[in-house]
Amino acid sequence: MQLKQIPTDPQRARGCVPGRSSYALWLLCLAGAIHCLSADQTALYVNPSDGSDDSQCGDEVSPCLSIKYVVENRLQSSYDKQINLKPGIYSVDGNCDLSIEDSFFAVKSTEGGVWIDCSSSQPFISAVGNSTKVSIEGVTITNTTSKANGGCIQASGIFSLELRNVAIRNSRSESAGGALSFTDIQ
């Protein structure tokens, strides 16, 4: 289980909720009763044309190259980071067949124009675990496939799934749920 890194001082917890941060809301954040991002937990950035996958990548000036690198190497140390995607085409290598288990996964287009192309060879994401939270916003996911259920997104036993302004195109499954497969969402 990964621990949330919530600031212990209410002055640093301002990013926890929009608007003014009250002491009661700060306590809820600290206790883990509500999900929040603090000001010192900045987003990680990915750019498919101008990034590099190394231990120093992730800020806006030096973005990572692939979503999978961020998931496997950078999210493990910080539960509450969001992945911001710069515009471009995210090809299958390092951007599809993502496995999320017992963690928080939030991916968002920062400026629009984000296409994730899985080249008809694999799903985009498979999420499992009763503490897993998945949020995807502002992207187009295309050419996904799966031998199991859910050609694009497979979710089983997760805590929450949120899709906002997401287009799924040309997705198929050899079983059921051509684009999405959800079981036991809490």
Image (cartoon, rainbow, N blue to C red):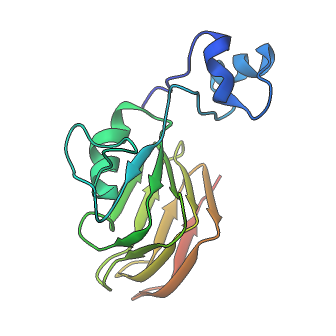
Do we see residue 178 in this rendering? Answer: no
Instruction: Say which residue appears at 43% left-offset and 60% top-offset.
Output: 86
Q: As drawn, which residue projects farthest toward the front?
A: 61
- State the image quarter where residue 51 is shown: bottom left
Establish if 75 lies above or below 11: below
Using the rendered view, name the quadrant where residue 36 is placed.
Answer: top right
> How many marks do you count on the picture?
0
Indicate the position of residue 61 as horizontal and vertical percent values: 35, 44
Give the vertical position of 170 relative to 100 (above or below): below
Where residue 3 appears, x then y in whole percent? 46, 26
Q: Nearer the viewer, residue 56 or 31?
A: 56
Please, is residue 131 above or below residue 85 in the view? above
51 relative position to 44: left or right: left
Question: Could you say which is closer to the camera, residue 125 or residue 51?
Answer: 51
In the depicted view, which residue is nearer to us: 174 or 151? 151
Judged left or right of residue 49, residue 84 is right
Q: Residue at x 73, y 32 (%)?
A: 17
Is residue 141 placed above or below 155 in the rendered structure?
A: below
Q: Give the image quarter of residue 30.
A: top right
Residue 171 percent coordinates (x, y): 46, 86
Taking the image as shown, residue 151 lies to the left or right of residue 61, namely right
Q: Is residue 35 visible?
A: yes
